[in-house]
Image (spheres, rainbow, N blue to C red):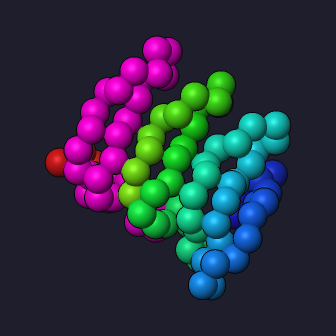
Amino acid sequence: FVEGFFFRGSVLLGSLYDMMHDPPRIVYSGQLFQGKRHGALGVSYFPDGTVSYKGSWSFDFQHGIGKTFWKNSGLLQYEGSFKRGVKE
């Protein structure tokens, strides 16, 4: 984990699950594996608390099916497939 962040959650089948915090805000909610965002459904947030990405993760990359949202409006920006953080 990054210095200054902390984890609050539980362990499920050897993987951490819940939230990574950068006080006083939540920056990610979802499954973690080896300290990285990883799993079928995770949500990352902008500093103001609005959702920035909702979808699949693979070792800290947006990977698989997901949605990105505009920071100022929260409206859907893109919905589709990602490969290692790049829209396909």
* Residue farthest to the top, as pictured: 73
Q: Residue furthest left?
A: 88
* Magenta span: chief secondary structure: strand
Residue 47: % across, % down: 65, 30
Relative height, residue 58 to residue 19 (above, below) = below
Region in magenta: 58-85
Position of residue 2 relative to residue 46, above or below, is below
Image quarter in which the N terminus is found: bottom right
**48 left or right, relative to 77:** right
| Residue occupying the far bottom of the picture | 14
Q: In this picture, is 31 found above or below 44?
A: below
Judge by depth and name the residue closer to the eye, 1 or 82. Answer: 82
Horizontal relation, residue 3 to residue 69: left or right:
right
Quadrant position of residue 76: top left
- Number of numbered discs visible in the structure rendering: 0
**Residue lying at 49% horizontally and 15% vertically, measured from the top left:** 72
Evaluate whether residue 21 shows in this view: yes
Residue 29: x percent and y percent?
61, 52
The residue sitting at 48% across, 66% down in the picture is 38
Q: Which residue sits at x=61%, y=49%? A: 28
Q: Is residue 59 magenta?
A: yes
Where is residue 86 shown, x and y percent of the image? 27, 48
The image position of residue 42, as x and y in percent, is 50, 54
Question: Quarter of the image holding residue 18?
Answer: bottom right
| Closer-to-camera residue (82/42) | 42
Residue ID at (53%, 34%): 51
Residue 61 seen from this side: no
Q: Is residue 30 magenta?
A: no
Left or right of 37? Residue 49 is right
